[in-house]
Image (spheres, grey):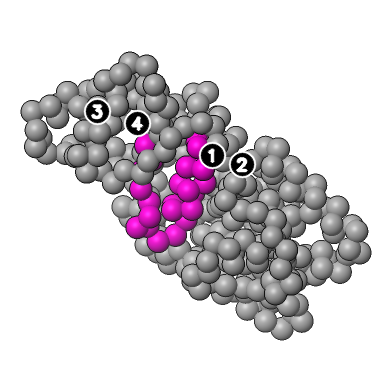
Amino acid sequence: DMKKVYLQDHSDMTGAGNWIYEGYRRAWESLGFETQYILGDIHEFQEVFKNLENPNNDIRMMLTDGFYNLFVNMPEEDDRWECLVERITKNAKIYLYAQPTHFPMPWGSHVNFKSFCSPELIQETNLLDNVKLWSFVDINKDYYPLWKHIETVPLAFDNIGYEYLEDEKYKFDVCFVGGRANNGFDEKYKIMMSHFSAFKDSGLKCGIFVGKNLTHEQENKLLYNSKVAINVHDAYQRKLRLDTNERTFKALGLTGALVADDEGQLQRLFPDVKRTNDPKEMVKFVKEYVNMPEEKLSAIKETNRKMILDNHTYVHRVKQLMEL
């Protein structure tokens, strides 16, 4: 008998998707599941189909609604196809990442912010008991009027993929690592630049890397060995206040001390994190940490790392999905 999870392949995505799904993959494996990435090729789905034929197999799938839409509407190359869709949607437990059907302007005008599923497909999906909907944002029902209940499953820390690796070379006062993350409006770049330029003349030893393609190990060491991590969010996240990025969890789980811009989900999950949209004040908050006596800063870091390991890893998130 098989316990298997098929995950949508995000390796061709620039940005965070790849790392998020890697975190999920490792978490599923740590819980005894075999994992496999799928790209949505008909032959891959036929393999899923074969595995479903044994009623004792525990088959699960993590898909986005865009991928699901593609797969349900695939051309019928094969007379078993109708049956295949039916079987997967009956015999597999599907965790479907639901995108909004209505979204505030200007963002709602861009495909990146809207579901690809038709109202008819959404209606059909809502009737399937084995399809559970989730999103890492706090759900505002106004943006999802067509979908059934969507569970909030925030992002998390991949404590299996990241380790506590000491390295003198990476001991910065303050660190940031991330990409330009253009979601169609390219608003985040200006926000990043306004914050990072404030650190130029701060006298702090800064390890700020934007779009530098650091290796996983370099990112790991940078975050673990620096005194403080900073985080910034995109314009829509600051305005709508519904989701924080994965860097929040990494920074608290690895660095242990975080100063961030002001975002709502971050505030709700971690009320003790210092937040400001004023770049000068961000520098001031970072310096307060850097200038603390070492024992005091160490104690804060240990407390935060433990809090993340106890509550906010991808293993916790997988267990939350399984309970749906």
Query: Tag 2: residue type?
Result: Thr
As measured in the structure, the alpha-carbon distance from the residue carrying label 1 to the one carrying label 2 is 8 Å
Q: Position of residue 4 (x, y in %)?
A: 40, 31
Sequence-wise, the earlier of marks 1 and 2 is 1
Q: Look at discs 4 and 3 and give the one toward the viewer.
A: 3
| Camera sees residue 93 | no
| Residue tagged 2 | 313
Sequence-wise, the earlier of marks 4 and 3 is 3
| Residue tagged 3 | 49
Query: Tag 3: residue type?
Result: Phe
> Which stretch did the figure color magenta?
6-29
As measured in the structure, the alpha-carbon distance from the residue carrying label 3 to the one carrying label 1 is 24 Å
Compared with 134, 255 (above or below) is below
Residue placed most toward the observer, 34 or 72? 34
Circles 4 and 3 in contact, beta carbons < 8 Å:
no
User: Is 50 part of what is drawn in magenta?
Assistant: no
**189 left or right of 205?**
left
Q: Residue at x 48, y 48 (%)?
A: 22
Q: Position of residue 97 (x, y in %)?
A: 40, 38
Circles 1 and 2 in contact, beta carbons < 8 Å:
yes
Q: Residue at x 91, y 64 (%)?
A: 293
Tally of numbered tags: 4
